[in-house]
Amino acid sequence: MKTLPLGKTGLTVSELCLGTMTWGTQNTESEGHAQADMALEHGVTFWDTAEMYPVNPVRAETVGRTEEIIGSWLVSRGGRERIVLATKVAGKGQVIRPGEPVTGATMRAAVEASLRRLRTDYIDLYQLHWPNRGSYHFRQSWRYAPAGIDKAAETATMTDILTTAQALVVEGKIRAIGLSNESTWGAARWLHLAEVLGLPRMATVQNEYSLLCRQFDTDWAELSVIEDMPLLAFSPLATGLLSGKYAGDVIPEGSRRSLNPDLSGRISARVFPAVAAYLGVAARHGLDPCQMAIAFTRMRPFPTVPIIGATTLEQLRTNIGAAGITLSSEVLEDIAETHRAHPAPY
């Protein structure tokens, strides 16, 4: 497993990141521990979680359970320094702090709670799960209308959050701060404020990215390269669609789709033809479709770390195997043609 610098944080991470959002719903504590053991054995030392996890569904009674599972693994296995651990504070929503935006005060309280659940003294990368003002992510781009945003109010809240982040860094509770489900304007504003005020710099962004979801390829790609802000790409398999297990519009027992039938808006009339086309690309070139999809995400011309998740050890082993794959120019050309034919499946 190769390692790479995480932007300008000074942290070094594995080229793949372990996602954990199924631990506590689709996966038991022991299954989560087994995944953690396998990841570490194969050199996947960068792990991502969130205070709201597990998902499918998000429930008040399970909020924080994934962090608790990671915490119990750390206690039983030791060696906190072996991993780079990322988590997130939830934005304005209905389950955690209903209706409350992220502020410096709520972020501090969330950091303290995550540290207790994770049973560690520090968090390597602390991310804002989504912006207070809303965004076009989570399939909201079809009706996105950025109206009524108060720039002065947004700037004041951003400054409050960065000031609190600075204090948390000084206290040794977090090492770096990052974004998630953010726009290019938002990222640029965060970076500007950090520079002019001498506050911590947003180091990374965690947005959805896969063969089926390529919103990052234009303005975001430019910002990512110029500002050295790596993409932590979540759902590189498009919630399992790119594995082919839902081909023919089937719903396998125990799959995410058995819990979330439309995969949070990803099931559409366009998605199955697109999936079939990418499965065809993999077949023509003798590639596992999951490994092809993850390798593609890893090889983008902007700094990218795919976040891989699984519900079985077999799935995880396959996904980790993508780290050893370099796609040929012929495969990349075939993918490009397929993308032009199926540009926005959801």
Image (tube, rainbow, N blue to C red):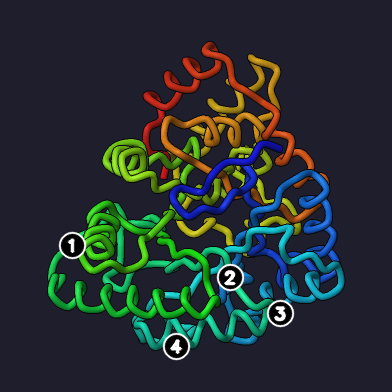
Foreground residue, 199 or 100?
199
Of callouts 1 and 3, the N-terminal one: 3
Do the CB atoms of the residues marked 1 and 3 lie less than 8 Å apart?
no
Residue at the spot of label 2: 123
Query: Dot 4, how many residues are within 10 Å of its Cα: few (below 14), some (14-19), or many (20+)?
Result: few
Q: Position of residue 147 (x, y in %)?
A: 14, 66
- In the picture, the quarter occupied by the C terminus is top left
- Position of residue 90 in the picture relative to residue 132 (left or right): right
Q: Which residue is mark 4?
A: 97
Residue 248, x across and y down, in percent? 62, 38
> Tag 2 or tag 4, which sits nearer the N-term?
4
Place of residue 181 in the rendered image (x, y in percent of width and height, measured from the top left): 39, 59
Alpha carbons under labels 1 and 4: distance apart: 24 Å
Three-letter code, disc 2:
Ile
Q: CA distance from mark 4 to mark 2?
A: 21 Å
- From the viewer's perspective, tell me whether residue 114 is left or right of residue 149: right
Q: Describe the element under mark 3 as helix, strand or loop.
A: loop
Image quadrant for the N terminus?
Answer: top right
**What label sits on residue 119 in the rendered view?**
3
Cα separation, mark 3 vs mark 4, equals 22 Å
Gap between marks 2 and 1, in whole Å? 33 Å
Disc 1: CA contacts within 10 A as few (<14), some (14-19) or many (>=20): few
Say which amino acid is labelled 3.
Arg
Q: Which mark is residue 146?
A: 1
Look at discs 1 and 3 and give the one toward the viewer.
3
Of the pair 323 and 339, the residue shown nearer to us: 323
Label 4, secondary structure: give it.
loop
